[in-house]
Image (cartoon, rainbow, N blue to C red):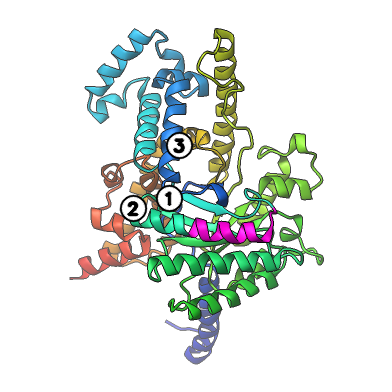
Amino acid sequence: MNLSIQDADKAELLDQLGAANLKFQHTYPGDKPDRQPVHTVYGGANLFKADTCVRMGDTALNNLRTYAPNFAELARVLQLKGHEHLPTLEKDVAELTARLDAMSPMERKQEHAWLAYSVYNKIVKKLQREAVEDFRIDFEDGFGNRPEAEEDATAVQAAGELARGMANGTVSPFIGIRIKPFTEDLKARGVRTLDIFLTALLEKTGGQLPENFVVMLPKVTIPEQMTTMVRLFELLEKANNLAPGTLKMETMVEATQIIMDEEGRNPLMRIIRASEGRCVAAHFGTYDYTASAGITARYQTMAHPVCDFAHHMTKVALGGTGIFLSDGATNVMPIGPHRGDNLSFEQLRENRDSVHNAWRQGFHHTTHSLINGLYQGWDLNPAQLPMRYAATYSFFLSSYDDALFRLKTFVERAAISTLTGDIFDDAATGQGLLNFFLKAMNCGAITEEEVLATGLTHEEIHSRSFFRILEGRRRRQAS
């Protein structure tokens, strides 16, 4: 066979391309297989207690059982698939529940009530087991501007409560603080709170941070704010004998300038690079962003088109980098207008209607985020938690069969490629499909047994890496 290109010339060109490819892969390693919480709950630092997350779960469960005492009621409020076939009388609902309880999972899935029944029961279990996945002790909007001495004292108090929560096992699996922004007027206050809080926490815990601890820096507009945080982290780590790189941060997308800078460029990648590998997530601030876009208060909601624009610009800028993205919050709280034990029938009805309307809004906002590839959002009140999980579970369960077929087919293609010795270079696509199941499993939407239907083994699932799955199968085939 005759060739026109000399081996030396070809090698030189491909080496140059190889260097460029490796640089690209370093910049865009793909989606992380690590667990991403489905939400972050923000709460004022002055209100934070060691058992805050546990109490939030109790409140959320009480809210659900008060306004949707059974799965049929919740399905009708949210108009879940099959809701029109569900009974309305309490006796009939109880009989249907008992019948579904007695069925196997496969039998149950053939019933009209399957989705509503599954979603409701998964919500209850989640609120009982792990209602809050991520909590941010808030020294910014949730705390406000207070006298210096008060914020100092609150930082020490909140650190003490977190230390007690760590000892008691009552903190959420992901947790952190939000300090004030590094704007010119608030930078000194933000640094002081960070220093006081971390110093007090490490003193009380013997130098231990909670797992998945992160510091949120809000209202970032320029890379220098991120760089300053990195240098502060280095000082804190050195002073407290923490390993270099221990402290991690998040940024917030809540100003138009972080979407488009003065030169007409999207600065998000430069801002992330300025964190020198310490930034793990970018969160959207719905109300600050809409305000910065000139939207009046009445229309500052997650459903406004300017939010979708910001989301897509963020996803385009940071896609494939491994940075977790989070949507913002629904500002309508599912809390009735009337309080007290001796409410009239009319007041009870108004409470129920108010809560149900807020539930629908929160459910639709979260579903919209999930459809747009944003698997995390903010919650501001424990009464919002049932709808966070209702939307999340409904999304994953409704998409399960299609995702199962796609991943199973993909795994089979990879297996054929392995057997024939061909190069299978779509690991990134496989990772994206695998991540769907990992996210669904992490939040409790599906079980590990349901992931096994894809053809993966327990060991492969827990590797959390489609590339490692392929490598393992190749090694086994070769041996």
The image shows residue 297 at horizontal and vertical percentages of: 77, 38
Relative to 362, is 172 on the left or the right?
Answer: left
Q: Can residue 158 be seen in this view?
A: yes
Closer to us: 225 or 348: 348
Residue 442 badge: none
Cα separation, mark 3 vs mark 2, equals 25 Å
Examine the rendered structure and indicate whether residue 419 appears above or below residue 93.
Answer: below
Give the residue at mark 3: 389
Cβ–Cβ below 8 Å for labels 2 and 1? yes
Q: Residues within 10 Å of mark 2 (few under 14, many from 20)?
A: few
Give the residue at mark 2: 168
Q: What element carries label 1?
A: loop
Query: What amino acid is labelled 1 in the image?
Result: Ala
Q: Residues within 10 Å of mark 3 (few under 14, many from 20)?
A: many
The image shows residue 255 at horizontal and vertical percentages of: 73, 55
Q: State which region is magenta.
A: 145-159
Q: Specify the principal SS of the magenta part.
A: helix
Closer to us: 62 or 118: 62
Give the residue at mark 1: 50
Cβ–Cβ below 8 Å for labels 3 and 1? no
Query: What amino acid is labelled 3 in the image?
Result: Tyr
Answer with mark 3 or mark 1, whichever residue precedes in sequence: 1
Is residue 27 on the magenta stretch?
A: no
**Mark 3 or 2, closer to the camera:** 2
Residue at the image position 38 percent from the left and 50 percent from the top: 438
Q: How many labels does the image show?
A: 3
